[in-house]
């Protein structure tokens, strides 16, 4: 009977929805269940004997947590922490902690319950971002109207003056330059509007290979002139993606041009695609059990052999008006990100200085069966 009770408790601990760790007063992990190991991207054997402080992305955060949870009788609810993960670099985790004593008040251990909050944080950030973009869209429409009207007046006046036959060459050139600058300002207003208020996606099923080939075709001559070799690995057998074809072609065109700009002296541009399943959130089934959903995507990778992106800039490249180029206003990748979101996709970047850049798009696909 005792053995059955022991096995029951052992099974219960291993099958909890939360990760469970037990640490001693020095912060050394003395027990870990499989869920905790899976959450942290490690094996149970890797966790045993490890200092809990070493799980934190910043050691000072880990030390602050350890000081709190090792206080006698202490209970901690939902301590939010950034923990290191070998695959995802970091994950956001909620930690509950309890200082455990037996009936004789002897210390037994500190029990930690870990829950992955990464998806919750992503959803929270996405809602905040959508609220900001909605406000930005309203402001952009009004701003565009206020700016474009005087620009139209300036251009019309300049064109009228340009028609004067008695105008000397210097003044004529000045007017032409003025018209070019007005056109440039109009273009930037249009780019800003495109980011702030993109057209609603008109999604349909399309073949990825066709989208990639159509977009590359526009750049054939420019690639030859820049001595850039483009290669593709996009199987015909891939499931179709459910997207607005025009918008995704615009995204890819922008990514290809960015890649070419990163290789001014020539190089390699490689485009590949493969199926991928991504966790798409949780839902309750008819038994009331929360189940993890999987959604089918096609992952398109755009890899260049250019100079790469500095680590400190990686987190900013999809932000509006961020640019490291001499020309441009920094809206290209922000528009790409916005259009991918509009098509219910995801976009990410991998890059190292001197080793090139890979932009990864994940687009929703039709899953047969």
Image (cartoon, rainbow, N blue to C red):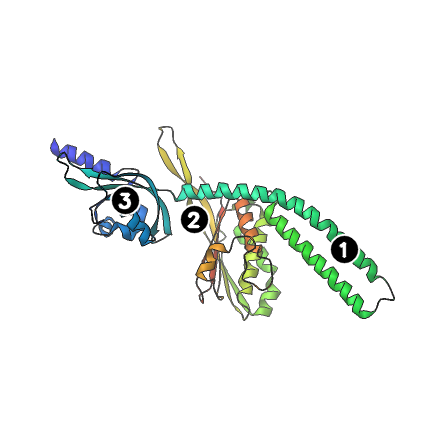
- Percent across and percent down for residue 127 are 49, 40
1 or 3: tag closer to the N-terminus: 3
Residue 247 in view in this figure: yes
Q: Position of residue 63 (x, y in %)?
A: 28, 50
- In the image, taking residue 159 as reference, residue 220 lies left or right, namely left
Most extreme residue toward the bottom, as rendered? Answer: 265
Q: Position of residue 281 (x, y in %)?
A: 42, 39
Give SS at disc 2. Answer: strand
- Disc 1, SS: helix
Residue displayed at 76% across by 63% down: 176
Q: CB atoms at circles 2 and 1 under 8 Å apart? A: no
Mark 2 near mark 3, Cβ–Cβ under 8 Å? Answer: no
Disc 2 vs disc 1: which is toward the camera?
1
SS class, disc 3: helix
Residue at x 38% of width, y 28% of height: 286
Q: Quadrant of residue 203?
A: top right
**Closer to the camera in the image, 201 or 110:** 110
- How far is mark 1 from mark 3, CA to CA? 66 Å
Q: Earlier in the sequence, mark 2 or mark 3?
A: 3
At 37% from the left and 36% from the top, the residue drawn is 291
Above or below 131: residue 89 = below
For label 1, the residue is 154
Query: Residue 259: x and y, percent?
Result: 53, 62
Q: Read off the residue under disc 2.
A: 276
Alpha-carbon span between mark 2 and mark 1: 52 Å
What's the residue at 74%, 61% (across, down)? Answer: 178
Residue at mark 3: 68
Q: Quadrant of the N terminus?
A: top left
Q: Residues within 10 Å of mark 3 (few under 14, many from 20)?
A: few
Residue 17 drawn above or below residue 170 = above
């Amino acid at each position: 009977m005792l053995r059955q009770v022991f096995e029951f408790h052992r099974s219960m601990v291993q099958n909890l929805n939360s990760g469970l760790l037990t640490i001693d007063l020095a912060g050394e992990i003395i027990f870990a269940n499989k869920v905790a190991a899976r959450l942290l991207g490690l094996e149970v054997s890797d966790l045993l004997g490890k200092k809990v402080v070493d799980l934190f992305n910043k050691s000072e955060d880990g030390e602050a947590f350890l000081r709190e949870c090792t206080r006698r009788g202490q209970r901690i609810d939902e301590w939010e922490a950034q923990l290191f993960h070998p695959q995802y670099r970091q994950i956001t985790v909620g930690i509950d902690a309890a200082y455990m004593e037996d009936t004789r008040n002897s210390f037994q251990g500190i029990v930690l319950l870990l829950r992955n909050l990464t998806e919750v944080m992503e959803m929270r950030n996405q809602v905040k971002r959508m609220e900001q973009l909605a406000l930005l869209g309203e402001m952009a429409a009004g701003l565009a109207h206020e700016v474009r009207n005087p620009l139209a007046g300036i251009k019309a006046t300049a064109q009228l003056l340009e028609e004067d036959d008695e105008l000397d060459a210097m003044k004529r050139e000045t007017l032409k330059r003025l018209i070019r600058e007005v056109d440039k300002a109009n273009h930037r207003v249009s780019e800003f509007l495109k980011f702030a208020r993109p057209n609603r996606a008109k999604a349909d099923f399309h073949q990825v290979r066709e989208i990639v080939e159509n977009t590359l075709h526009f750049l054939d001559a420019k690639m030859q002139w820049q001595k850039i070799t483009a290669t593709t690995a996009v199987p015909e057998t891939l499931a179709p993606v459910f997207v607005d074809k025009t918008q995704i072609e615009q995204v890819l065109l922008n990514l290809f041009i960015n890649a070419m700009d990163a290789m001014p002296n020539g190089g390699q541009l490689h485009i590949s695609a493969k199926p991928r399943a991504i966790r798409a959130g949780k839902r309750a089934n008819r038994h009331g059990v929360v189940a993890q959903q999987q959604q089918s995507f096609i992952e398109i990778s755009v890899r260049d052999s250019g100079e790469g992106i500095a680590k400190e800039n990686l987190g900013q490249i999809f932000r509006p008006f961020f640019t490291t180029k001499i020309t441009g206003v920094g809206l290209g990748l922000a528009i790409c990100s916005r259009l991918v979101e509009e098509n219910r996709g995801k976009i990410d970047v991998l890059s190292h200085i001197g080793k090139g850049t890979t932009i990864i798009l994940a687009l929703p696909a039709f899953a047969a069966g």
